[in-house]
Image (spheres, grey):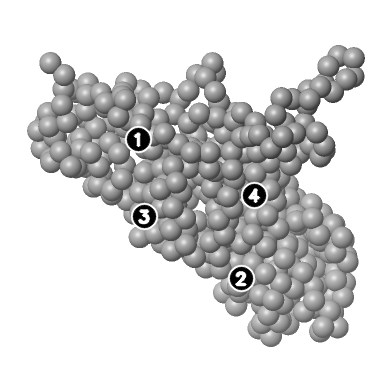
Amino acid sequence: MAVKLADVAARARVSTATVSRVLNGNYPVAENTRARVLRAVADLEYVVNGPASALAAATSDLVGILVNDIADPFFGIIASAVQAEVSGGVGRRPTGVAGTRTGDGDTRRTPGSAYGLVPPGEKLAVVCNTGGSPERELTYLTLLQRQRAAAVVLTGGAVEDTGHATAVNAALSRLAAAGTRVVLCGRPPVPPEAGALKTGPIPQTRTSVERFFSSRHATPRAPAALSPASPSPGAVSPVALAFDNRGGARRLTEHLVSLGHRNIGYIAGPAGRTTTRHRLEGHRAGLAVHGIPDPAHRTVHGAYDRTAGYDAARELLRRDASLTAVIAANDTAALGVCAALRDRGLQIPGDVSVAGFDDLPFSVDAAPALTTVRLPLQEAGARAGRLAMGREAPPPGDVAMIPAELMVRGSTSAPHS
């Protein structure tokens, strides 16, 4: 006799509604309750109704890309790369009539390619600008779920708030349960347990019971023979492409220390963001390994923009006129630092060295060219797009650390006596 939902509920000593919530991921459930339900599912070999699940998991041609600020080149580059992959690479190839090239050099028109017809597998990428608001982030996730989005890509750091993390995890669980692929780009993964916040990459975010359930009962990822753009109806954990913000910041600080700097000011990003904390931790680790103190007055928090960098640099110099170097947590803020130093009549790097982070396109054209940490934003965004479309296999453990590269340029030098 077929096992019913009520049988699972009775074995787990919960209501049928709780079982549904656990299987659908559409409501926060206590970890011990969830584990009990999944154990009962595994013990009874309960199989979710296939046709009903397939109907519920039917997705649209919509792909959502969430960014904090589309005007920030950091997010613009990532979003553009994701969109190019989602639209079949349109953004990567020259404009003109689409077609296929034959061996004799002739380009033959692809049927329908020049007549406004949608190519197979084409998706509509929609960029959702949250403005850094946690509430807007949750609203967009809810709207994308209602639209049955085929995939969702979340970019940039996460808000470090227990309540928000719980709500986001619940929203991502609902999306995954509906067959939506979820990719985190530039955002560290967090475990699904409500309220649990951890730092750094997490190799495995599911409990042993969930892994057992997934291997035996959840719908597997679509095999290669199927259309790669068709999301699996089984709920899968988000794939995370995390930037090595700690390692990059540490190498940047150690570069300045190697030049002879000991009095280094640091302009951090907004408090309460994973990116801000990880880069600040990397900076402090670079100081600590050389036994250099890090007094609180040498760190100022601010937004990731030019005005914040300008104001923070003035504040740092007011607090400590002995500074010989200033690190800004991103390149845009570093430009504000340079402007503030010039307005004080200080030379860069003669009087004060300046460094940034991200290696945005304008960094090499600054005067002097900005020493910074390069994050491969274009490559990471393209990879996130391929993962969202199912054209690339997820990394081991669904987590990949994207390396950061130190770019030494003219804005840093040894301190002048």
Amino acid carrying label 2: it is: Ala
Q: Quadrant of residue 39?
A: top left
Query: Where residue 104 appears, x then y in whole percent?
Result: 90, 14
Query: Where residue 292 appears, x then y in whole percent?
Result: 65, 65
Decide: few, some or many residues near mark 2? Use Cα within 10 Å; few <14, some 14-19, many ≥20.
Answer: some
Q: Secondary structure at mark 2?
A: loop
Q: Residue at x 62, y 38 (%)?
A: 86
CA separation in Å, label 3 and label 1: 22 Å
Q: Give the label, 3 or 1, closer to the camera.
A: 1
Which residue carries the number 1 mark?
A: 56
Mark closer to the chain start, 2 or 4: 4
Q: Give the label, 4 or 3, closer to the camera.
A: 4
Q: Nearer the viewer, residue 346 or 208?
A: 208
CA separation in Å, label 4 and label 3: 24 Å
Query: Where residue 235 appears, x then y in whole percent?
Result: 38, 34
Q: Secondary structure at mark 1?
A: helix
Q: Is the residue under label 3 in contact with that under label 4 (CB below 8 Å)?
A: no
CA separation in Å, label 1 and label 4: 28 Å
Which residue carries the number 3 mark?
A: 167
Mark closer to the chain start, 4 or 3: 4
Which residue carries the number 2 mark?
A: 303
Q: Quadrant of the C terminus?
A: bottom right
Marker disc for residue 79 = 4
Mark closer to the chain start, 3 or 1: 1
Amino acid carrying label 4: it is: Ala
Q: Secondary structure at mark 4?
A: helix
Q: Give the label, 1 or 2, closer to the camera.
A: 1
Q: Quadrant of residue 386?
A: top right
